[in-house]
Amino acid sequence: MNLARLVELGEAIHQELGREYYLTGAGLKTEPAFQPIYDRFAVLVSDEALEAARTSGSAPLVEWIVGIRIGRLVASLEEDQLRWEQQAVVRACGREVPYLRVPIELANEPDRATRLENTADGLADALVGMGQGAQPYYGDRLGDLQIPVLVIAGGRDGKYASIATAMTRSLPRGELRIIAEAGHAVIGEQPRVVADLVAGFLTGSG
């Protein structure tokens, strides 16, 4: 397998996984199906793919292939988690709100009418076209950045904390800050901590 084919397949699987995460996570699809996606891209977890990544000399690419392997192994657990999230209910302020709708129902209630104008297909297409899986991979060019870079991740989000750590190693002037009491949505969970870290980084006092 050549490097171009590896990248092409990688972009394709991330687009499919991104769409599946969005549709299921947003409650627009009742049954998650990550395992079939990994099965369709089984070549990415093959020894051939791992060898192609190693031959490229790119450590982030090797980590990415290993991440896909791990993702396939835990796909059924992620499916179970999303099923639970679809059924869970949050009780607060005298209201019962489905877990997956809490951000919209509580945090963005004034914009509810506008948000309801979106369609499931439109939102999913936006994610596929502009989401993380659709963006070019620049991990192997981080070493070219000769400017200070602050990398922030939540300690409760093991996957992205690991990615943040790997990114910082590749950055000549990278600084890593792991916020222990935060998960994936770091800014939303610990806005003051993030603001203080960014302010300190920009002023040189952090």
Image (cartoon, rainbow, N blue to C red):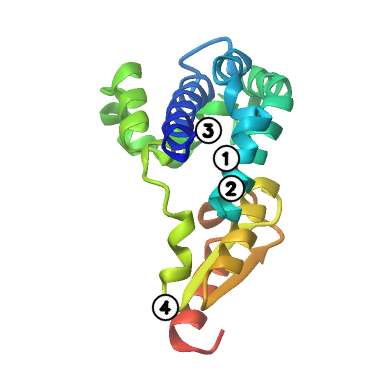
Local packing at callout 3 (Cα closer than 10 Å; few below 14, some 14-19, many 20+) is some
- The residue carrying mark 1 is 52
Which is nearer the eye, 146 or 126?
146
Mark 2 or mark 3, which is nearer to you? Answer: 2
Q: Quadrant of residue 65?
A: top right
Say whether disc 4 or disc 1 marks the residue closer to the N-terminus: 1
Say whether disc 4 or disc 2 marks the residue closer to the N-terminus: 2
Q: Position of residue 159 (x, y in %)?
A: 66, 46
Q: Is residue 41 left or right of residue 156?
A: left
Q: Which mark is residue 102?
A: 3
Query: Disc 2 marks which amino acid?
Result: Thr
- The residue carrying mark 2 is 55
Spatial separation of the CA atoms under disc 1 and disc 2:
5 Å
Mark 1 or mark 3, which is nearer to you? Answer: 1
Query: Disc 4 marks which amino acid?
Result: Gln
Spatial separation of the CA atoms under disc 4 and disc 1:
29 Å
Say whether disc 1 or disc 3 marks the residue closer to the N-terminus: 1
Spatial separation of the CA atoms under disc 4 and disc 2:
26 Å
| 206, above or below 140, in the image | below
Element type at mark 1: helix
Which is nearer the eye, 122 or 135?
135
Q: Which mark is residue 146?
A: 4
- Whether the residues at callouts 1 and 2 have beta carbons within 8 Å, the answer is yes
Q: How many marks?
A: 4
Element type at mark 2: helix
Q: Position of residue 63 (x, y in %)?
A: 63, 47
Mark 4 or mark 1, which is nearer to you? Answer: 1
